[in-house]
Amino acid sequence: MTSTRPSTRPRTRGNSPTPVLPDVDPAWLQSLDVAALCQALTARVMEAVALCRDYHPGLPQPKVWCDLRGKGAGQAHFGRGGLRFNGQLLEENRHAFFTEVVPHEVAHWLVWHLEDGPTFRPHGREWQTVMLRLFGLSPRVTHSFDTARSSPVPYRYRCACREHGFSARRHANAQAGQEYRCRHCRGRLCLIE
Ligand SMILES: [Zn+2]
Ligand SMILES: [Zn+2]
């Protein structure tokens, strides 16, 4: 069927939008073990998709995985037909995942399935419109989660003022002669043996 861009009126109170998905009890979220947490997240995705179906009844159900690693919180994977979430970041930022990350990724899912959706910019006007008008959320693109555990940096370097984590690739470049400097003290970074 033909889908058009959502064109509801913004659900706003004053100047800031009001979240449309019901809030989730943080204490309940904290009580869940990892498997139950991913299961609850899947149910939350279904809830968000149900909301989208008011505007795009043919929207398919995405599969849900909690297998994403690294710095990203979530990722719509159209080739695999679903949404991937970062299990480590989910565990550490449960409430934000339910209130922000799920709508963010489901908005990608919806926009991609609109007519011409694959040609739209990932965080462009259409995605922003879905975030604001359908989910009642400010269309923020980046998260501010602490990624120290989800994206461990295996090599430790130091300058005069602090320690720096290097990825394997950065470490290899440094060992091959590339010079890295601290942007705070301008000192050269040396491997901590
Ligand atoms: Zn995004
Ligand atoms: Zn420094």
Image: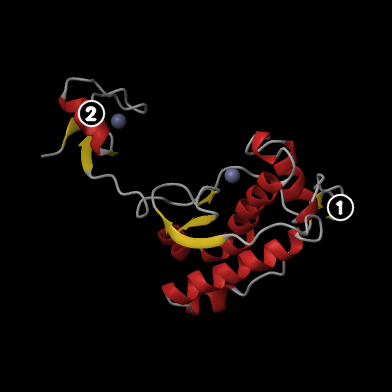
Report the colour scheme.
secondary structure
Q: Is residue 118 above or below residue 187?
A: below
- Spot occupied by residue 131 in the image (x, y as percentages of width and height): 72, 49
- Image quadrant in which you'd find residue 5: top right
Quadrant in which ligand 1 is drawn: top right
Q: Is mark 2 within 8 Å of ligand 2?
A: yes
Name the residue: 56% across, 68% down: 42
- Is residue 130 in sight in this rendering? yes
- Given residues 186 and 174, the one toward you in this image is 174
- Spot occupied by residue 176 in the image (x, y as percentages of width and height): 16, 23
Q: Is residue 28 above or below residue 158?
A: below
Q: Residue furthest right?
A: 9
> Which dot marks residue 14?
1
- Image quadrant in which you'd find residue 121: top right
Residue type, mark 2 in image: Leu
Image check: 42 left or right of 3? left
- Is residue 160 in sight in this rendering? no
Image check: 120 left or right of 69? right
Whichever of callouts 1 and 2 sits on the residue coming sooner in the sequence is 1
- Spot occupied by residue 180 in the image (x, y as percentages of width and height): 27, 24
- Spot occupied by residue 87 in the image (x, y as percentages of width and height): 43, 61
> Which dot marks residue 124?
none
Quarter of the figure with the C terminus: top left
Q: Secondary structure at mark 2?
A: loop
Residue type, mark 1 in image: Gly
Q: Secondary structure at mark 1?
A: loop
> Which dot marks residue 189?
2
Q: Dot 1, crowdedness within 10 Å: few (<14), some or many (≥20)?
A: few
